[in-house]
Image: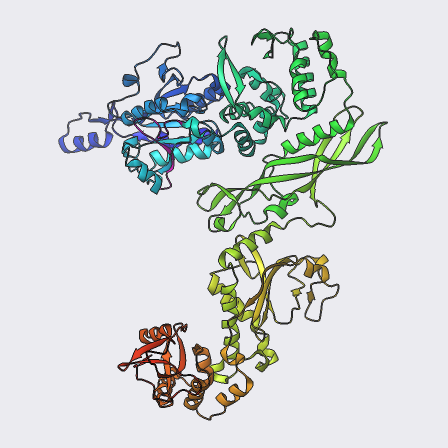
Amino acid sequence: MELARSLRPFQRPWPRGRRAQLDLHATVDQYAMTGLLIPIVMPAPERWFDAVVVADNSPGMVVWDNALKDFLRVLHQVGAFRQIRLLRLDPVAGAVVSDGSGRPQDTGRLLRAPDSRRLVIVWSDFAARAWQHGLPWSTIHVWAEKSPTIAIDPLPAALWAHAGLDLPAVRVHAPVPGAANTALRYTLSPLLRLLASTDENWLPVPLASLTPSSLGRLASALIRTDPAGCEAVLTTAVGRIDEDPDETAPDGEALATAFLRLASPAAGRLATLTATWEQLPVGMLSWLSVHALPKGDPASAGEVIGGGLYDVALHDRTPVLRFRRGVRERLLRGLRIDDIRQLNDLIAEQSASMPGALRTLVANPDGDNMHALESVAFASASREALRALGVEPAMPTETPDIEEQSVSAAVHVPLMDLFRDAVQSACDDLHNLEADDAFALFVRWADGGAWVEEVMPDLSTIEWSPSETFDGDTEIGLVHVEATVSFVALVPKSDVDYQDVRILEVDWNDHYSRVLFDPGDPCRLSWSYRREPARRPELEFNRVDEVDGDVRLADLEMQNLTAALLRLDPDGARLALILRRTFDYLYDGARTGRFAWRQLLKEEKHALGKRAETELAQEFDLAYGERHDFRLAGVEFEFVVTTQRLFMVSRHRHPAIHMFVTADDERGVMSVAVVRATSDLLASRPNRDQKQTLSASGRAAMQWIHRNVPIPANLLSRLPAEVVDAVMSPPSGAARVRELLRRVRGTPIDMVAIDTVCQQRDATRRVREAGTLLRAEGILVLSGSTAVGRRIAEELHYHLPKQHFMSIRVTYSSPANPAPSFEAAGRRWTVGLAGSRLVKAPDINAVV
């Protein structure tokens, strides 16, 4: 139903079809004007496209036969196409197209319509080796030049690159409904633009997976001209850019590792089970996907083949899978002895109940021959796999008959093996589970919801504790295992850049992006179990626990917040400037003449936090939270500034994340830490303001982002007391500015210091006046706001920022003097030292 709904855009009619219909309004209008009742006809709307589905006929595609039938049924149900025809493409045999009877077809006639209203749908998982070469793609390129052509890959998008779909990818946009491939618009990356110089004939082929969202994007982009566009791959006249893809093919170890990482848990489990054999028929793989997985999942067989783990060959007209070099060795590391035992029992049971239903391929000294399962025991394959795992099986060397083989089902299975199998199955069942309260700690930041993607248990950590026994031997209790869990989550598009996640779909909808999140650190999963003697326990998911009683679960919101803060301010310099502006705002030196924290009243000191909040929001463009001060990277948090290292938390604000900033303007340093203020980290009693301090364990739990970052100095607070007294003692602002420039030389002086000393509106005017008067004392006043001032400071090896002033005592320079100098008033000048000749400083027109 969802697939059919996603294809509805194709129901858009072609307005002027081949048939005619009565134009009722025109007929009535003519009758009203002439009195003659003559029917007037007009072209009737009709379905826009007819469809030709060209299905890949590679041996490995047999696992997708049912999916293809379902897809064709959906196409008929949608009713969007005039007719639907199925053809077969053999990419191995020269990209030959044939009908259902195997007769070759003339694609130039079948796949081309004069009005370009024939839609070619290429159905393939692109896993056959032939897709790694140019011929099949050059054939599709020719089709796309003649008729609208799209590709449907039933594999999940994450596995596309493992098959032949590792072509250049773009996002295409249709300028008009039903546009041909040659009219689709796209933008090449810089690298592709470079490659285009050698082959200008790029042609996009829109691409979708067999999911409602992917098909919906494709249909909306091509028929509704959705500006979001859809995915596409680029083909050329020669098919592919890379002439010899085998030279860069990954080794089997890397290929299998990547597959296990990207594939669904069911497909990863199925691939691991197939390592029991060196080779097996495709039909056997399909049978295993239904019978050997906890929840029969036929589509997982297609994922396994499409993952590129095997070479598919025909053996007596039967498709057979053979592992690529290095793949089986990697998969064997995930195979358990229990798996082989259970496969042994499963196949023995099937053979006994339905003789001849299965055929398997096993090693035979006489060569590769197909044998009935009844005549060659599965035990020979399982023994070989056991030896590969380093276990010497206690089995007879000769091939047992069916009666001997079926006895294996009665072998006693240790209790640990029963629990391991039950836990593995329960972990597989967590796939796609909504991450509710049990997993809230991991994905609380995911506003649009989150779902468990994969659970990878460490089966060596299984522990169980019975709590009660009843009805004789039936036991109930709890079982635990350590595991790593990954999630698929929906996060606001505005926050996705701040999350440590892998983006799956940037434009999942108008508001959210779909991402994959892997916390990395393990957690402890718990189930309630019920067990009868010699039976596998039945598990019911309970909760997520701490890995260790002394180790708290990683707070992922804190990790995301910390990462976002570090991206905004890697070294703490921006936050230090915020605090500098905050302190200077509270000092209000232009009106009060204050410049130090000790000069503030108690009530004024209380305003530090609120003012810092305002500065922080403006500097980092932070959004205000609904329940707490700010929101960043999808995480709401409290912002607290303290000068006494007393970390106070409002009683009603825990267990919120708190960002603590310790600021010491006397020492000129600040530090930043974050902590989730849970009740167990707070002191026992609140004060009269209903605030509690962090306990010793709470302070130990603080994660420090920055430590002892220098705060830009307030110049006056760094001057010796006798200098400050001399500067501030004159009664007039002009005299105080003059004294400041006379005593503080060679140091940049910012406007905060000037305003504090002057305490008048036009402080810069007083600086200019002081510069004129101080020239007689050999003191030159430079302004960082003028080019000449910055030039002279640079030539004298001083740093003079904009909006700053600097006074320097100068004297004449001689050619024999190696000290830095500058030219003004027709001669060279240098910095005057103690004992230097006193001369009048030059007029450099230091206009501010």
Whether residue 2 is visible, yes or no, is no
Between 795 and 49, the one lying in front of the other is 795
The count of marks equals: 0
Q: Decide whether residue 782 is among the magenta residues.
A: no
| Near-viewer residue (541 or 829) | 829
- Can you name the residue that lies furthest to the right here? 472
**Where is residue 761 drawn, in percent x and y?**
40, 84
Q: For this view, does 488 lie left or right of residue 245? A: right
Residue that protrudes farthest toward the bottom in the picture: 731
Residue 139 spot, x, y in % from top left: 33, 22
Q: Quadrant of the C terminus?
A: bottom left
Residue 568 or residue 610, whichever sits in front: 568
Magenta part mainly helix, strand or loop? loop
Residue at the image position 77 percent from the left and 18 percent from the top: 411
642 over 561 or under it: above or below? below
Left or right: where does residue 505 sit relative to residue 397?
left
Is 605 located above or below residue 655 in the figure? below
Q: Which residues are magenta?
A: 227-244
| Residue 580 drawn at (x, y percent) | 51, 72
Across and down, in percent, residue 804 comes to 41, 76
